[in-house]
Image (tube, coloured by chain):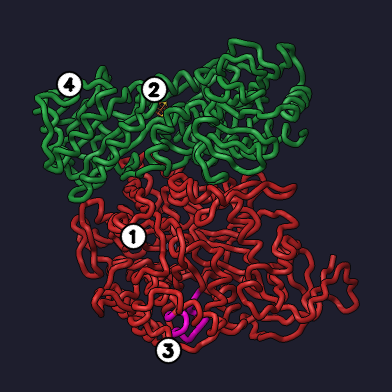
């Protein structure tokens, strides 16, 4: 069956296509170049419509223990936000932390066809995949957390052979079924368990004697040498700390050219000027990102309203519990492996701090030049729910709208930010880079995020509405693997989506030491720690896609 | 590893078997075959032996006590579910896929979901929903804790290998010569017999009554803050003992307070858990300390977790309106039955015969392990396999973090609960 999308304005940055009117053909779930004279069995006339690949969210907490803790913690997030079942879709609920099924539906209805869980603890990987398995419509994948786990820290402190460290990184990616590796407050989650309350970039962990800098550099180098496409995904030290901008700049300098991705960088861009000792460090960060081509970022934009933060950073979240709203929260130490902190939060537009956080995120968006190295995120749900993306896109594309919103927020905050001076408006092409082509390239999804022949037919069609919020909130058509799943922002077909993983090679010999280690210390055997493909495939409900990995060097 | 894996063991001999018979999910069992069943060869306990070694039976499904085929039983079950005003999907002793299937059919049929052991779990959930807490997990406690306080729970009875695996372990990640641990039993009549070995330093017994625990915890929090507390006794314990315990908590490098919610069977036990949680939060302002909740037998944690991620709420949810409707009182199993709100019970108990259905006149569809013998003949009876014996499955551990794969250990005709429920749903 050949499907033809006729006459749409195509934005396909991966192939350099910027708003060119052209036809797209779909066959067997893929975009194809049809044989001459091939019979078209269905055709969609898209004259004047905007066509892009399906959206890809490279950082969204959609699955895993801390998200479900947040769901349990916050019945008030769900009350009044229930979603009724239909003949096609299941019931669900939630605003900031929607139930899994509802999250999948909402992503698809917003034109997204993939989302990646960025903080999967190895010890909790099975549950993360179970939750992602219950998130329909979209493709999924997860970044496994390393850097506060005892095995890696003892390797590093014991000056283990670097090749064994790489074996362990690769083994963990296989065992947890991950596509990338994230480090969260490097070493800090572990240090907190030893009652350290902060861990600066060059401060030693009291037990292992290693520093966050050591951890970052070794993980980043390890991933590069393993050929993993997505660079180390870094949630740095000192999240949310005024003055954290210095740590972030030093982290970039310390990379020495190694590829790295700095996530929700907005939370790491705070300076200390002014009466409140809190100001924007966005300009300095943007300069550093512009100058260092090895660095990519996502923003973690703050959006006003109620949310519930869920982070692996137990050390920083414990501090944030002072601002919990409502006043309840969970902090956990987990399996000598990781931790988590779940803290509800209300971002208020009249609050100096929150308004400045909002402005800093937008400044970063507007001051970083290369859209291939900056991705659109709210760090869902930490800065706000992913359903805010259409609003955020409008803030970036429409200067008048942005300035109108700026009038409604805390005005003192704007004095400590350069936002008012920024005239930039994002183009549709740049938005397509930031929400599709860029994330796909960064994550190594070879057949996603673009529209050339051979790509998976994950395609979103929008009305070219000058109100960009309305445009991106309600796509006219969404195709997933060639199936029309959404029409006018409503689901018309339910599909499951696949799980993307990457599998760098490792020496099986590492399992000998791991086996002994698990037997000696853990409460789970190594054999049971590993997730099998069958668990994800689960009687045909899921699918595992292994994305390519470069050759391992050394 | 099973027999087919190179380097594995003799036929039908299994290593690294996860045990679903209590919430701590030991996964180091070794299980081998006997002439007519299975034998726990290594790392068993009284519960796991009872579970794995029970006689193997494959009875037929029944309608009103008469043998029928599976498809007849499924058709009758579907007829009953369809006719019901408010079916209760209860018991919920099943694996993750079983709960997923329950959620799906309850959503379509407009039913209520609740687990048989929710009453215990709600002693925790209420605290989570009102104040939250600082918690830890089994491996963390096993390696890190230098002080354990057992809070009013007879852990040995509910989790026979907890002390062996988490408290008496000789090795620790953080030292080749780990320090000895102090174990405080704060509660009456708690079995201490398995707290022994080279790691155990002091054992302190403070025989407080369950109903007085809250008062003691509240006083401990006040004492730690320097707020004066009156009286020579606190909750019937000598004041000096309570003060001594406060000192131990502040001095611990990593203290862990452990409770098993089903043990806290006294009125308003959630307030006791809350008092513990608030005290632990305070300790963390200066040193490290965490709670560790056990319990979660009969698949209770899986039920709570799957229900929370799919509906937003941890059980006691009704789908009668077409949307999740949450009411922790109204939709509690006992209240639904007492208030005659439900007109059909679908009871799921695939692990042990202990999860007997409630005595009620409400018609019942029973999906259970053949080991369970109901007091009353159900309208429909469908024997199902036990996850981890008759079929594969996944299950969530008591700490709500770790999940484990359960493995099929023997051939059986007994279906998975998930498949039976899907068939019933397909026939609606
Ligand atoms: S303690 Fe619990 S999980 Fe461990 S073997 Fe006994 S019943 Fe099974
Ligand atoms: Zn994040």
User: Could you tell me if the residues under marks 3 and 2 are in contact, i.e. CB atoms within 8 Å?
Assistant: no
Image x and y of residue A480, in percent:
70, 63
Which element carries disc 2, helix, strand or loop?
loop
Residue beneath label 2, please? Answer: B45
User: Magenta region, mostly helix, strand or loop?
Assistant: helix
- Chain the render paints red: A
Separation of disc 4 and disc 2 at Cα? 35 Å
Residue at 53% across / 69% down in the picture? A443
Which numbered circle lies on residue B236?
Answer: 4
Q: Colour of chain B?
A: green
Position of the N terminus of chain A, as image quadrant, is bottom right
Mark nearer the N terminus (1 vs 3): 1
Whether residue B121 sits left or right of residue B109 in the image: it is: left
Separation of disc 1 and disc 4 at Cα? 47 Å
User: Is A186 or A225 nearer to us in this picture?
Assistant: A186
Q: What's drawn in magenta, residue-wise?
A: A363-375
Callouts 3 and 2 in the same chain: no
Parent chain of label 4: B
Which element carries disc 1, helix, strand or loop?
loop
- Callout in the foreground (1, 4): 4
Which numbered circle lies on residue A421?
Answer: 3
Of the four image quadrants, the one with ligand 2 is: bottom left
> How many badges with numbers are in the image?
4
Parent chain of label 1: A
User: Is B204 or B41 nearer to us in this picture?
Assistant: B204
Residue at 60% across / 18% down in the picture? B370
Crowding around mark 2 (Cα neighbors within 10 Å: few <14, some 14 to 19, many 20+) is some
Residue at 31% across / 63% down in the picture? A186
């Amino acid at each position: 069956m050949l499907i033809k999308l006729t006459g749409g304005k195509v934005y396909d940055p991966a192939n350099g296509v910027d708003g060119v009117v052209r036809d797209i053909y779909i066959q067997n779930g893929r975009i194809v170049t049809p044989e001459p004279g091939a019979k078209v069995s269905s055709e969609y006339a898209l004259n004047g419509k905007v066509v892009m690949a399906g959206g890809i969210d490279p950082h969204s907490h959609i699955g895993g223990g801390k998200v479900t803790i947040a769901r349990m913690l916050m019945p008030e997030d769900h009350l009044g936000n229930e979603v009724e079942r239909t003949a096609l879709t299941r019931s669900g609920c939630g605003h900031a932390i929607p139930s899994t099924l509802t999250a999948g539906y909402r992503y698809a209805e917003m034109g997204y066809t993939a989302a990646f869980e960025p903080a999967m603890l190895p010890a909790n990987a099975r549950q993360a995949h179970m939750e992602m398995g219950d998130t329909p419509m979209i493709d999924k994948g997860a970044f496994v957390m390393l850097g506060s786990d005892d095995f890696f820290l003892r390797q590093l402190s014991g000056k283990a052979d670097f090749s064994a460290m790489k074996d362990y990184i690769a083994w963990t990616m296989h065992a947890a079924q991950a596509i990338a590796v994230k480090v969260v407050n490097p070493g800090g989650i572990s240090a907190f368990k030893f009652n350290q309350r902060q861990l600066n970039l060059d401060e030693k962990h009291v037990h292992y004697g290693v520093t966050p800098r050591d951890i970052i550099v070794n993980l980043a180098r390890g991933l590069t040498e393993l050929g993993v496409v997505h660079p180390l995904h870094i949630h740095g030290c000192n999240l949310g700390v005024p003055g954290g901008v210095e740590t972030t700049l030093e982290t970039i300098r310390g990379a020495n050219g190694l590829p790295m991705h700095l996530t929700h960088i907005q939370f790491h861009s705070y300076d200390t000027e002014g009466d409140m000792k809190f100001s924007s460090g966005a300009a300095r960060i943007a300069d550093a990102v512009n100058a260092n081509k090895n660095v990519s970022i996502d923003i973690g934009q703050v959006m006003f309203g109620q949310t519930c933060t869920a982070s692996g950073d137990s050390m920083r979240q414990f501090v944030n519990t002072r601002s919990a709203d409502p006043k309840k929260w969970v902090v956990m130490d987990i399996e000598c492996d990781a931790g988590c902190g779940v803290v509800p939060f209300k971002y208020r537009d009249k609050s100096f701090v929150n308004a400045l956080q909002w402005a800093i995120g937008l400044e970063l968006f507007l001051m970083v030049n290369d859209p291939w190295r900056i991705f659109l995120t709210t760090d869902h749900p930490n800065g706000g729910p992913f359903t805010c993306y259409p609003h955020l896109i409008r803030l970036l594309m429409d200067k008048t709208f942005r300035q109108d919103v700026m009038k409604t927020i805390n005005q003192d905050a704007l004095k400590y930010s350069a936002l008012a001076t920024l005239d930039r408006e994002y183009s549709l092409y740049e938005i397509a880079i930031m929400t599709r082509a860029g994330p796909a390239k960064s994550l190594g999804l070879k057949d996603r995020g673009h529209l050339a022949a051979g790509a998976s037919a994950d395609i979103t069609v929008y009305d070219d509405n000058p109100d960009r919020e309305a445009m991106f909130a309600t796509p006219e058509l969404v195709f997933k693997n060639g199936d029309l799943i959404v029409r006018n922002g409503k689901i018309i077909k339910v599909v499951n989506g696949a799980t993307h993983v990457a599998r760098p090679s490792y020496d099986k010999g590492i399992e000998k030491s791991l086996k002994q280690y698990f037997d000696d210390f853990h409460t789970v055997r190594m054999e049971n720690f590993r997730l099998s493909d069958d668990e994800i495939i689960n009687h045909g409900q899921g699918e595992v896609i292994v994305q390519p990995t470069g050759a391992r060097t050394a | 590893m099973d027999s087919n894996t190179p380097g594995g063991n003799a036929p039908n001999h299994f290593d690294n078997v996860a045990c679903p018979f209590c919430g701590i999910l030991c996964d180091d069992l070794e299980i081998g075959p006997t002439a007519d069943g299975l034998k726990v060869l290594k790392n068993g306990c009284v519960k796991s032996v009872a579970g794995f070694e029970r006689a193997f039976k494959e009875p037929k499904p029944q309608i009103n006590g008469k043998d029928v085929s599976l498809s007849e039983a499924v058709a009758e079950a579907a007829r009953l579910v369809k006719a019901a005003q408010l079916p209760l999907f209860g018991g919920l002793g099943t694996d993750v896929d079983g709960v997923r299937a329950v959620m799906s059919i309850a959503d379509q049929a407009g039913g209520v979901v609740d687990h048989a052991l929710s009453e215990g779990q709600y002693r925790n959930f209420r605290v989570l929903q009102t104040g939250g807490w600082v918690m830890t997990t089994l491996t963390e406690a096993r390696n890190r804790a230098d002080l354990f306080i057992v809070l009013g729970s007879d852990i040995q009875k509910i989790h026979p290998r907890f002390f062996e695996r988490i408290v008496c372990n000789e090795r620790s990640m953080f030292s080749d010569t780990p320090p000895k641990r102090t174990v405080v039993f704060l509660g009456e009549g708690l079995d201490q017999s398995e707290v022994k070995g080279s790691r155990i330093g002091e054992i302190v017994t403070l025989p407080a009554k369950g109903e007085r625990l809250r008062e003691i915890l509240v006083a401990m929090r006040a004492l730690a803050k320097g707020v004066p507390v009156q009286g020579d006794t606190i909750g019937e314990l000598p004041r000096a003992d309570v003060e001594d315990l406060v000192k131990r908590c502040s001095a611990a490098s990593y203290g862990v307070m452990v409770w098993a919610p089903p043990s806290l069977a006294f009125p308003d036990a959630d307030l006791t858990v809350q008092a513990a949680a608030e005290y632990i939060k305070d300790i963390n302002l200066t040193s490290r300390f965490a709670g560790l909740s056990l319990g979660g037998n009969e698949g209770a944690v899986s039920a709570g977790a799957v229900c929370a991620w799919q509906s937003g709420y941890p059980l006691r949810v009704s789908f009668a309106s077409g949307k999740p409707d949450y009411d922790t009182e109204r939709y509690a199993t006992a209240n639904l039955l007492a208030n005659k709100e439900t007109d059909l019970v679908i009871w799921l108990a695939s692990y042990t015969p202990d999860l007997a259905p409630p005595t009620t006149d409400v018609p019942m569809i029973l999906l259970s392990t053949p080991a369970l013998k109901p007091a009353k003949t159900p309208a429909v009876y469908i024997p199902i396999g036990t996850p981890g014996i008759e079929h594969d499955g996944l299950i969530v551990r008591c700490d709500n973090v770790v999940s484990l794969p359960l493995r099929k250990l023997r051939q059986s005709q007994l279906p998975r609960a998930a498949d039976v429920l899907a068939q019933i749903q397909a026939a609606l």
